[in-house]
Amino acid sequence: MTNTLRTILGGSVLLAAACGMLGAAPAAPQSAMGARPAAAAARPADALLAFRDDGSLERPRGYRRWIFVGAPLTPDDMNDGHAAFPEFHSVYIDPASYDHYKRTGDFRDGTVLLKELSSVGTKASTSGKGYFMGEITGLEAAVKDSERFPDEPGNWAYFRFTDEDGGPIHRVAEPLPAASCAACHTASAEQDSVFTQHYPMLREARGYGAGEPEDR
Ligand code: HEC
């Protein structure tokens, strides 16, 4: 059997099993094809994140393999020597929520956005003058979960893994009050408390439409 054939056959067995069409599996109604189990659909963020019983969030792992959506930069020297947020902001979205966004243009329940912060290292390299990343200095998260955060604006909760004035990146973070984070996001962000106006990869993804291949 060729590798290609084996892959195709393997795929159809998996598909049949997922749809309940194999003899051993219980018959599923046709409308349930492709639907996720209720529990998994209700809390998709739980598959990616570890919340403790007190509601605090453990520092997520593996997010540098997520989808990178933009890199805002607020250098200190353009902000009276001390920007409100550390300087480079590398923003990532979890892959399943990116796929959903691409299909629908909406942030699904369970979306996780992470912002990894770094300092400006040097302002000159062989490519010219500019701002070049220094060290990783922080991590912040926005998590949309209607069950876990029913009273937060748009069901978004915000976490910061450093103290307000910087310092080490902690292993765990508590949800921050709406006044600290959500208020500004709700008031100024372009779409559902997310600053899509600053994320070209998300703006482009919105236009791909269902089933269309990505340009890049
Ligand atoms: C004064 C307004 C303001 C406040 C307060 C604020 N943010 Fe943001 N946040 C922004 C802006 C603007 C962006 C996008 C541009 C950037 O990163 O500079 C952003 C982006 C983010 C992102 C990336 C995803 C997104 O929603 O665009 C996360 C995560 C985030 N902020 C977390 C936080 C956390 C955690 C707090 C509270 C400690 C906070 N923010 C407070 C303005 C704010």
Image (cartoon, grey):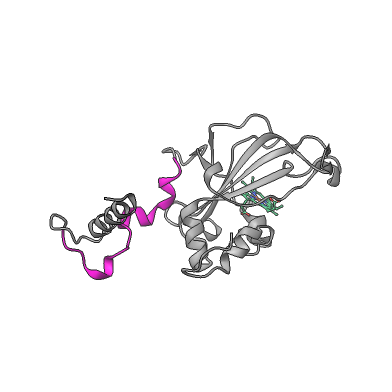
Does residue 111 appear to the left or right of 123 in the view shown?
Answer: left
* 6 versus 170 height, above or below: below
Answer whether residue 14 is visible to the viewer in this image: yes
Residue 61 image position (x, y, % from top left): 50, 38
Residue 129: name its quadrant: top right
What residue sits 52% from the left and 70% below the top?
Answer: 209
Front in this rendered view, residue 95 or 155: 95
Left or right: residue 106 compared with residue 87: left
Residue at 41 percent of width and 38 percent of height: 53
65 or 75: which is nearer to us?
65
Coordinates of residue 213 in the picture (x, y in percent): 51, 65
Q: Is residue 151 visible?
A: no
Position of residue 68 in the picture relative to residue 132 (left or right):
left
What is the quadrant of the C terminus in the image?
bottom right
Q: Is residue 127 above or below residue 196?
A: above
Q: Farthest residue toward the left?
A: 23
| Total numbered badges shown on the rendered structure | 0
Q: Which residues are magenta?
A: 26-50
- Front position in the image: 145 or 61: 61
Residue lying at the far top in this picture: please name it.
Answer: 168
Q: Quadrant of residue 176?
A: top right
Residue 11 locus on image (x, y percent): 30, 55
Residue 153 lies in the magenta stretch: no
* Percent coordinates x, y for residue 184 in the rendering: 67, 56
